[in-house]
Every structure is written in C-alpha cells, then in structure tokens.
Amino acid sequence: MNKTPLALLLAATLMAGHVHAQTTAGGVAAGSDATATDNGGWSGSGEFGFASARGNSRSENLNAKLGLSQENELWRNNFFLNGLRSKGEVSVKDAAGNTVNRFSTTANRYDSGASVGYKLDPRSYIVGALRYEHDDFGANLWQGTVSLGYGYIALKSQRTELSFEIGPGYKRYRPADEQQDVNGTTLKVRQPSQGEAVARGLANFKYRLTDNTAFEDTLLTEAGSKNKYYQNDAGLSVSMTKKMALKLGFQVRYNSDTQPGTKSTDTLTTTNLVYNF
C-alpha cells in the first residue's frame, strides 16, 4: 500500500513538534505575539482529519496539512504541505466479467509549495514561488510551477488582511493517462509531459469575525495557453483554546485541459482539528 500520505502526516507532526519546542524554549507561550517576535516572525499550524466507516459500507478518509509563515520587517515567507488519501468500496468487473465490490483507493493526492518574499517597503515585496502537486485521480498526474513576481499588501489591520501577488512563471505537468478501448479491453495510455509559460496570480483574504472565529480565502491562478489552473481554498475556524481550533474547509480546483472521461473540476470539503504553534 502506498504510504505517502502517512509519511506526510508523520513529517507534519515531527516538524510541528520541533517548531513548538523551539518557540517555547525561552519561556514564552507558543502562538503569542511575543513568541513571533522572538523567533523572527515565524508561526504555523497543523491540521488533521480522519473518518472511518464499517458495517453496511466501508470507507476511510485521511487528510493532513502543515503551514508555516514568517513576516517581519524584511521577509514575507510561506511554506505548506498537504496530503489526502481515501479508500472505499467500488464496483469492478473481475476476469470472468462478474461485477464485484472491492475496497480500493479512491483518492491519493499530496502537494507542497513555498514562497519567499523580500519586502521593498512595508506593503510591497518581490516574491519567488514554487509549487508541486501529485494526484493519482486528477486531471494531471503531476504538475510543478516556479514563478517570480510582485506582491502587495493592500490592507492590514487587527481584523482584516488582503494581499495580492502576480508574476510570470513556468509550469511542467503530465496529463492523466488516457483510457482507450482495444479489442474490448480498456487500457491506460501514458501521456507525455508538457511545459509552458504561465501567469501566476495569488489573492489572500483574512477576516477575524470574533475573538475566536476567523475566515480565510485564498485564490491561486496559473494560466497558460495550453492549460489554465485555478484553485480556491476557503476556511472557517473556531478556536477552542489559544492553540487548538476546529476548521471547516472547502476547496475547488479547476483544470481547463483534461483527458476524455476526466472532469475539469474537483472539490474537497474537510472538517479538521487544528493545532497552532
């Protein structure tokens, strides 16, 4: 069985514990403003969600996320690592042509990325970004993008933050295998990888509704002449303590160029436990 999502979860847990240990070593509570100042502006969060069903139906769903960010007078940096894996009962035909139910993987995706921003002044900055995604059931088996651009913090207050990034980049990706019928047998045909110049755009909006409730929405655009990719992540989190929160998330991903039988739009709804450090 593919252990990639479990490895991602383990890595996220280890990194979270390492950063937490560093930020609390000086006797300051993790997640506080004083801690962020003492450690150069670094903060982060880890998310985890799991569901399992047995009985009349069988299913397993696991998703994990890790996010790190830094902002100080000179830098505005971000790093993320996400993993998703699901298994469920699917109907397939065996060698004899009979329809049987099997407990098979239905989702296996992970993505990671980082951006490094150097501030020109308190609001504007130059940013370099890198993102990689692998999806066994998506429009593209894998895709990677590197870009260089300009960022601007349009609004920042105690409750609201709005920022934008835009710039040119280069994207390399491999479309999903194409299904072909050969003499009554369905075969997967490997597709060649492709590359193209893209325009990358990112818009991030944060709003604190109350002292313990916050909303965040991030829109990513990677548009090229062959394929246009859009991803929107919206999340509503409710804090239970200074470090723990519950978060409801909704993600929409869109690829304009897909193989026959593959949908352009994917959605993901999650309910996760969040640990802030």
Image (tube, grey):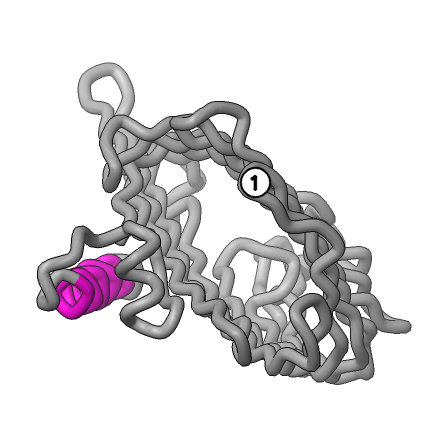
Tag 1 residue: 216
Q: What residue span does the magenta drawing correspond to?
A: 7-23
Q: Measured from the top left, where is residue 97 in percent x and y?
A: 44, 40
Residue 159 drawn above or below residue 123: above
Q: Nearer the viewer, residue 156 or 185?
A: 156
Count of numbered circles on the image: 1
Is the C terminus in the top left, top right, bottom left or bottom right quadrant?
A: bottom left
The structure residue drawn at horizontal position 35% and vertical position 49%, both measured from the top left corner, is 85
Is 219 or 180 nearer to us in this picture?
219
Q: Residues within 10 Å of mark 1 (few under 14, many from 20)?
A: some
Residue 8 is a magenta residue:
yes
Mark 1: secondary structure: strand
Q: From the image, which quarter does the N terminus lie in?
A: bottom left
User: Residue, x 27% and y 60% (percent of image)?
Assistant: 35
| Residue at the image point whose x is 54% and y is 25% from the top | 209
Asked if residue 199 shows in the view, the reply is: yes
Vertical side of 74 occupied by 92: above or below: above
Q: Is residue 229 left or right of residue 127?
A: right
User: Which of the 4 quarters of the picture holds residue 275?
Assistant: top left
**Figure check: 237 above or below 175:** above
Asked if the stretch drawn in magenta spans residue 56, the answer is no
Residue in front for this viewpoint, 36 or 132: 36
Residue 79 x/y as whole percent? 45, 69
Q: Position of residue 158 (x, y in %)?
A: 54, 41
Residue type, label 1: Glu
Q: Position of residue 210 (x, y in %)?
A: 48, 24
- Residue drawn where x is 39% and y is 67% of the image: 41
Query: Which residue is farthest right?
Result: 225
Magenta region, mostly helix, strand or loop? helix
Dividing the picture into quadrants, the one containing residue 234 is top right
